[in-house]
Image (cartoon, grey):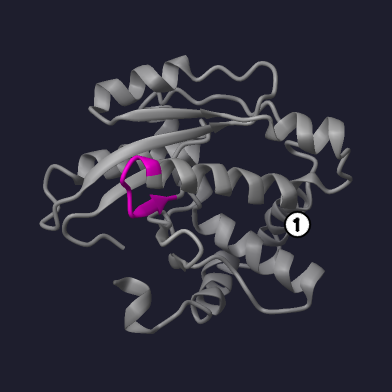
Amino acid sequence: MVAPGDNIAAAVSGGKDSLAALTALAALRRFYPKKFTLAAITVDLGLPGFDVSAVAEFCAGLNVPYSVVKTDIGPVVFEERKEKNPCSLCAKMRKGALNNEALRMGCNRVAYGHNRDDFLNTFLLSLFYEGRLNTLEPVTWLDRSGLYAIRPLVYVTERETAGFAKHENLPVVKSPCPADGHTKRAETAALLAELRKRHDHLDAKLFTAVSGLFPRNKAASE
């Protein structure tokens, strides 16, 4: 995921997972043999009640340059377009703003905080709603932007990131999104939680299936 000389932009939403990934990467800089630099970027969707001042202070403490990109994505999605399924459009616009800022800052990789549960949820969402076997990838080449997207928490569970965030007192910011907790992804997460009660080692078995979808070619890891 990391090559010598990389300049990595951590995508920081303010949630526990992205902050955990940022913290881990900041610590990794100190001893990882492949030297890299790190920055952090937050895309402000323009929704009321979103305050990342504590995140800015946290980044300063980690010695990580921090940029907040102001946008009107929230009002466009919820007020102008009145999207019934807002997540898809919001994600595309948010990633576009993030990638543009990463390029402006001279970064060549963007690190997301997706954990193992996210990989499983995406797998089920694709199966149920698209009729195909697909999931997130640990390393993805974004040909339109010329960036790599990396997901260093691929083997870390949601429970572990929650415990880490609490132990380290990370400055978690509650999402101001009106759809938060009321999405298809949230429904799939609830389904997984219910299935875990009935099937032993479900996550390990699902992840074995999911990891079989990861690219095995050399170019994906360069």
Tell me which segment is drawn in magenta. 104-111
Assign the N terminus to one quadrant of the image: bottom left
> Could you say where residue 36 lies in the image, as x and y percent from the top left?
19, 50
What residue sits right under mark 1 in the picture? 191
> Could you say where residue 66 lies in the image, as x and y percent from the top left?
36, 28
* Magenta stretch contains residue 109: yes
Q: Is residue 75 above or below residue 85?
A: above
44 to the left or right of 34: right
Q: Is residue 178 visible?
A: no
136 to the left or right of 54: right
Q: Is residue 222 above or below residue 8?
A: below
Viewer-closest of 190 and 3: 3
Viewer-closest of 153 and 112: 112
> Could you say where residue 74 lies in the image, as x and y percent from the top left?
72, 32
Local packing at callout 1 (Cα closer than 10 Å; few below 14, some 14-19, many 20+) is few
- The amino acid pointed to by label 1 is Leu
Viewer-closest of 102 and 175: 102
> Could you say where residue 103 lies in the image, as x and y percent from the top left?
39, 47
Q: Is residue 167 above or below residue 132?
A: above
* Magenta stretch contains residue 126: no
Assign the C terminus to one quadrant of the image: bottom left
Q: Secondary structure at mark 1?
A: helix
Residue at 64%, 29% in the rendered image: 175
Viewer-closest of 147 and 191: 147
5 to the left or right of 45: left
Q: Is residue 38 above or below residue 212?
A: above
Most extreme residue toward the bottom, as rendered?
Answer: 217
- The quadrant in which residue 201 appears is bottom right
Residue at 55%, 42% in the rendered image: 97
Residue at 41%, 26% in the rendered image: 170
Q: Is residue 1 visible?
A: yes
